[in-house]
Amino acid sequence: MKVLMINKFLYPKGGAETYTLALGKMLQIHGHDVQYFGLNNKKNTVGNQIGVYVKDIDFSKGIRKNLSAPFRIIYSSEARRKIRMVLDDFQPDVVHLNNIQYHLTPSIILEIHKWRTITQRCCKIIYTAHDYQLICPSHGLFDTNLVPCEKCLDGSYRYCFQTKCLKNSRAKSLLGTLDGYYWRCSPAYSYIDKIICCSKFLKGKLDTQKRFRNKTVAIHNFKDIKPDMSVQKGKYVLEFGHLSKDKGTETLLKVAKRMPETKFVFIGYGPSSEKMRNIENVEYLGFKKGDELYRIISEASISVCPSEMYENCPFSVIESISLGTPVIGAKIGGIPELIEEEITGELFEAGNADDLERAIRHILFTPGILQEYTENCYNAQYETSASYYEKLMKIYEGK
């Protein structure tokens, strides 16, 4: 089977890129022919055989110095023209879309459908939703204060402009609003055969709009991890990933200050890292990856996912539990789907430092609980590349 993977960025950058590259590699291992289409960037690690990509937009220059940017954000003639070149050359059986908004734009869906209609080729259009961009101009279902917001779920995108949801900017919010209305009126999304949602929570939000309701399927992201069951726990509480207020890092720091007898370790980047200075029981290790990151996760007593936003399928939860580390997760978004409460971890009210402290103290200081949860984690089951591949093939084949 020939599969064309499409994503804005074709190099390791974030969750969507991790998924896109891992999925492409998995398909190649199973004998499928995989090529990629996205933005032209010297960092690209994958591509297509004719070397055709879309010119990147440098948003850092601002709209005034890049006058074509506002129009290209919503609709890209260049992307349509170049995706057609790749389609004609590669002749894919499946086009698998990922993050395309604001760079490639949904205009490429129109061209893919046009191509398969003209050529009469049985080509499936599959879309993996990594966030809420299909129903929310800000892509995250949050307002300008990064507080969860669902005002646009009914398709009334004017709220984005009225409240300046996009980075508190009237101009950017206007573009987001126009983008939402434009593609709501366009038939582009109707040409998608199936939308893969990485959480039941995300599927539920997309299903609030009739145009997506019969297209969605929920499958958690996959991760192949072999835990080291002989590891010695290091008696510390861990948070890793993006460290910011909306991710709940500052709520966890409040708890750390209340528990001076307990060590708290933070890994990653983000504005909240600046607030970790001069807290004696807090250690900030910066960015870690690979085996070193997995060792630190494995040795932690507890991993915390304190997000105050609508997370979908955070890899941090899957990685922690798969490595034998219980997780305390915020009761928000898709996080509760990944944690078996009082088996592989516990849940707390998002943003509630008192409730988070209660959960941490319960696991750390109740005799037998930490060991019980740790042993349960080793038996937890998540999607593996093998199980995900089996489900994906059924989608690709239209079963």
Image: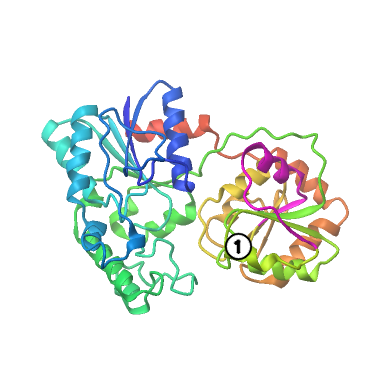
Q: Position of residue 100 (x, y in %)?
A: 32, 49
Q: Secondary structure at mark 1?
A: loop
Q: Is residue 283 magenta?
A: yes
The residue drawn where x is 43% and y is 62% is 140
| Residue 120 to residue 131: above or below | above
Q: Position of residue 29 (x, y in %)?
A: 46, 23
Q: Amino acid at mark 1?
A: Lys
Q: Is residue 317 magenta?
A: no
**Quarter of the C terminus within the rendering:** top left
The image quadrant that residue 88 belongs to is top left
> Who is closer to the viewer here, 267 or 157?
267
> Who is closer to the viewer here, 169 or 140?
169
The residue drawn where x is 49% and y is 51% is 199
Q: Position of residue 127 (x, y in %)?
A: 34, 45
Q: Is residue 342 left or right of residue 385?
A: right
> Who is closer to the viewer here, 20 or 399?
20
Residue lying farthest to the right in this orientation? 367
Pointer 1: what residue? 331
Crowding at label 1, few (<14), some or many (≥20) Cα neighbours within 10 Å?
many
Please say whether residue 399 is visible from this viewpoint: no
> Who is closer to the viewer here, 84 or 386?
84
Residue lying farthest to the top in this orientation? 31
Q: Position of residue 380 (x, y in %)?
A: 66, 40
**Quarter of the N terminus within the rendering:** top left
| Residue 42 to residue 369: above or below | above
Please say whether residue 168 is visible from this viewpoint: yes
| Residue 223 to residue 135: above or below | above
Q: Is residue 392 left or right of residue 343?
A: left
Q: Which residues are magenta?
A: 281-304
| Residue 152 to residue 396: above or below | below
Q: Is residue 360 left or right of residue 304?
A: right
